[in-house]
Image: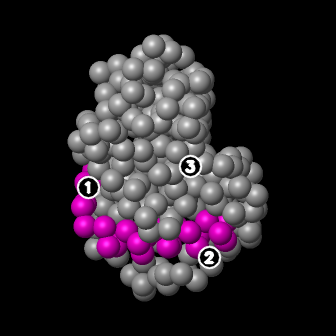
């Protein structure tokens, strides 16, 4: 993600001595995303990604790494976390939790095709089914309490028109709940930049730091709002059909999910409109900060109807 915490060669070398990964050769910061600090790290034994987690406790980070290992063991394409010499995945660097995972081949795609969306839908459904057997639940860190707090924080920064839009959508979502729909552990951030492709195949699902116990339909809606829309917020019908077809070829929807689909789209749009408004108006300091435009999610909500 963006580089908020800068490190020295000596600091990283000392950190790596807690893992059996050989000697440090080189490292460089990664400019992408908005939440944590990531570095590419090359050692004498392999290539890795170091993540310094900016806003979560070591206990939470260890949960994320346990989940990542579970996904890897379940044949879901993702990085394999590296255990330290004392058996934990999470260690401390610059007084923050830090992890090391194997670096995957491939890269994310800024532009995706219908075929990419079909493959993504299939893989997301496989992940959801696998995670229904994962018994260690985690509450969504961006649930109702976060919505309320963040709305209060950003409301004064908005034009009155968009203040009304935000208040309207909060009222709509407070009346409805997705909690009774089929659940699993979900990724909750399956944007294009969190999926790597090697050729025409997915080589890795990355950045599990928002994963939680949640509604599978909500996870689909998060991906749908990013993978299946043009920059103006309009749906690409071909990509949308492919994503949903791929998903349902592995896990068909329940009737309750079909009925709740419009609500899920709006709930997903609200969550990321709020988070991007927060990042835009109250940015964190960093060396390679990357702030995403909130406008597309605003447009989705403007175009939504009851």
Residue 142 at x, y = what percent?
33, 47
Instruction: Give the residue drawn at x 58%, y 39%.
Output: 46
Vertical order, 7 against 252 (above or below): above
**Residue at 24% of width from left, 61% of height from top?**
136
Helix, strand or loop status at disc 1: loop
- Please tell me whether residue 51 is drawn above or below residue 173 in the rendered image: above
> Which residue position is annotated with label 1?
138
Magenta span of residues: 117-144
Question: What mark, if any, has residue 194 been given in the picture?
Answer: 3
Q: Nearer the viewer, residue 81 or 156?
A: 81
Considering only order in the chain, which callout, 2 or 1, is on the residue closer to the N terminus?
A: 1
The reply to whether the C-beta atoms of the residues labelled 1 and 3 are less than 8 Å apart is no
138 sits left or right of 275 in the view = left
Q: Position of residue 12 (x, y in %)?
A: 45, 21
Q: Earlier in the sequence, mark 1 or mark 3?
A: 1
Q: Quadrant of residue 227?
A: bottom right
Give the residue at mark 2. 246
Of residues 166 and 19, the one nearer the viewer is 19
The reply to whether discs 1 and 2 touch (Cβ–Cβ < 8 Å) is: no
Q: What's the distance in space between the residues labelled 3 and 2, CA to CA? A: 18 Å
């Amino acid at each position: 993600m963006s580089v908020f915490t800068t490190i020295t060669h000596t600091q990283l070398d000392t950190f790596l001595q807690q893992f059996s990964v050989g000697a440090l050769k080189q490292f460089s910061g990664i400019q992408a995303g908005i939440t944590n600090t990531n570095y590419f790290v090359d050692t004498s034994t392999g290539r890795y990604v170091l993540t310094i987690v900016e806003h979560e406790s070591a206990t939470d980070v260890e949960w994320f790494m346990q989940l990542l290992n579970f996904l890897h063991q379940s044949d879901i394409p993702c990085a394999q976390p590296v255990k330290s010499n004392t058996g934990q995945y999470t260690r401390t660097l610059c007084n923050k939790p830090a992890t090391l995972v194997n670096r995957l081949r491939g890269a994310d795609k800024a532009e995706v095709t219908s075929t990419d969306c079909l493959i993504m839908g299939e893989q997301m459904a496989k992940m959801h089914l696998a995670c229904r057997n994962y018994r260690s639940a985690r509450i969504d860190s961006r649930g109702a309490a976060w919505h309320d707090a963040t709305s209060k924080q950003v409301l004064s920064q908005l034009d009155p028109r968009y203040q009304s839009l935000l208040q309207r959508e909060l009222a709509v979502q407070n009346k409805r709940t997705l909690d009774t729909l089929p659940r699993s552990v979900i990724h909750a951030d399956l944007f294009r930049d969190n999926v790597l492709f090697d050729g025409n195949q997915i080589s890795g699902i990355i950045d599990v730091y928002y994963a939680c116990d949640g509604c599978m339909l909500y996870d689909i809606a998060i991906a749908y709002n990013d993978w299946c829309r043009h920059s103006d917020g309009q749906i690409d019908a071909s990509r949308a059909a492919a994503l949903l077809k791929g998903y349902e070829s592995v896990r068909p929807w329940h009737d309750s999910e079909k009925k709740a689909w419009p609500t899920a789209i709006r709930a997903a749009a609200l969550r990321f409109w709020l988070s991007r408004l927060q990042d835009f108006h109250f940015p964190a300091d960093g060396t390679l900060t990357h702030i995403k435009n909130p406008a597309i999610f605003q447009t989705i909500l403007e175009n939504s109807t009851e």
